[in-house]
Amino acid sequence: MDVVGFVNGKIYTRFNPKKIVNALVVVNERVVYAGENEKAKEIVKFLNGEVVDLEGKTVLPGFIDSHMHLDELGMYLNMVDLRGVRSIKELKKKIGDYAEKAQTTWVIGHGWDQELFEEKSWPTRWDLDEVVRDRPVMLSRVCLHAGVLNTKAMKLTGLLEIDSPGVIKNEDGEPTGIVKEEAFELAREKFKETLTLEDYEKFFKNAMSFAASQGVTTVGFVSCDEKSIQGLSRLKEKVNFLIRVIVYLEPGRREVSNKGMYGNKDILESLKKLGTKRGLGDEKLKINGIKILADGSLGARTAWLSKPYSDEPSTSGYPNIDKKTLKELIKEAHEAGLQLAIHGIGDKTIDMILDAYENLGDIKNGRHRIEHASILRKDQIKRIARLGVVASVQPRFVITDWWTKSRVGDDRVKWIYPFKSMLENDVSIGIGTDCPVEVLNPWETVYAAVTRGKYENVPYYEDSKEECLTLEEALYAYTFGSAYIMFEEVNLGTLEERKLADFIVVDRDPFEVEENELKGIKILETYVGGKRVF
């Protein structure tokens, strides 16, 4: 029997309402006592365990990231970091310098945002050709819904010849190398074909180690494909995972077809044949359901809005899947006993998702999800609550998507990321990062949820400041809330008795710092099942 007592701490066992104790006793990975020091020491002595002195430090439940891309994070940690690049010239230099050193078949980078470029334009394949011609180059935009490829990569993927709205052309009808949504997904699939299962094992080891260092003890791994689940399974045979991984699989291989991305649903069909239902697995690796990407991003103007974009009236965005196919996929997954997690950023897409959910009848026990819910009308919030749909939201978008007001205009600005309104209408929310779209650091996300760009002069702060969460609400949503929307509230989300002992030790009490200092809080130690993993 593995027995450890943690004493002399300031331990927040839960939030909303807050509860603080001085000590925990962990037996075989679960909390058996949360209370006072002397009682904890007595229990540990009786059970012949060991005592860890927390020396007055602050302890919190581990963060649960409800929506992130574990494979993409692993890849990101092994590619060119383009976050914060301020010009196409700087981007080209970074790629050129990396290509000289990297001994890889493809040159891969992530994180650029044309909104930051001094040129005020998107990079093209001709820009990339100037620095790398002999190897394929693929650079994903920060949103992971668009990218730019050099000519070599465009030829290898066949995108020079494909006629698709996702292949952006210039006035002369030539593909520019800019690819969005289904075309970008095709390019990524071609790149992934070059990766081995050993590559995936490396990516997952790197990603889990990094997550532990950030105080993230459980992740909701969305958009997991066939190769990724194979890589995870192989790795789990060899090592004990540092963190907990809850998987939402792709329905099948994404492709360009007359059904959008989802003409192929081989993975869903396999799950149905095997009788796989939500919760298959163990406490470290579990399959929960199916992730569907119903529209794109605001940054790429591919999120589907009910009215045109204010800064580009020629488009309202578009869905990645037609209504009929979405309804069919949702019905199949629901009847198979799987949880659904559907990406919906534009309000028109969210209407479509809610129509499909309502078509199923009473779904409250399914806890089916909407991912992001970025542009959400008041009537939609009430409808989400009535249906019992839950949401995974990403507060840091509020700061990094500082340009959103120009996209949607004054009339819709109050619909942007309405976290407080969702809570006030009894919508259950969990918090994620969409990493590597956003940084995994939870304190950056907590800070964004509480301040909403107040200190960054985000243009719509004044328009939506009533949607700021309190610190208590943000931490609750990032722990218990995330556990709840992934059916893990019995095991995770608090440090109450019988729960798994996943917790972090931090350098400051978040309730004793100014709100603008929240993002500077540091993780000192991370424990999963009472065992230190960082």
Image (spheres, rainbow, N blue to C red):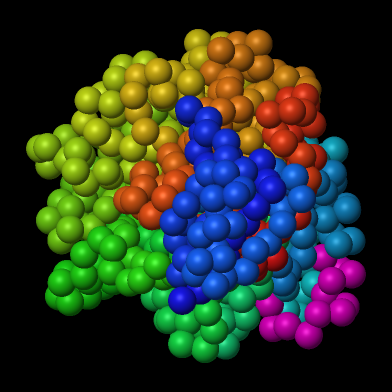
Residue 98, relative to residue 134: is it above or below?
above
Q: Residue at x 39, y 38 (%)?
A: 391
Q: Is residue 252 magenta?
A: no
Residue 379, relative to residue 286: is it above or below?
above
How many marks can you see? Answer: 0
Q: Residue at x 67, y 24 (%)?
A: 451
Q: Determine whether, in the image, residue 158 is placed left or right of residue 522.
A: left
Query: In the image as oriented, which residue stretches furthest toward the left?
Result: 361
Identify the image quadrant of residue 191.
Answer: bottom right
On the image, the x and y values in percent for residue 415 come to 47, 19
Quadrant for the C terminus in the image: bottom right
On the image, the x and y values in percent for residue 274 come to 17, 77
Q: Residue at x 56, y 12 (%)?
A: 466
Q: Is residue 101 magenta?
A: yes
Q: Determine whether, in the image, residue 132 is placed left or right of residue 105.
A: right
Closer to the camera in the image, 449 or 102:
449
On the image, the x and y values in percent for residue 483 come to 41, 48
Q: Residue at x 35, y 19 (%)?
A: 425
Evaluate whether residue 136 shows in this view.
Answer: no
Q: Determine whether, in the image, residue 505 is placed left or right of residue 67.
A: right
Residue 248, relative to residue 137: is it above or below?
above
> Where are the magenta residues, as a range?
95-106
On the image, the x and y values in percent for residue 7 come to 65, 52
Evaluate whether residue 464 shows in this view.
Answer: yes
Closer to the camera in the image, 295 or 415:
415
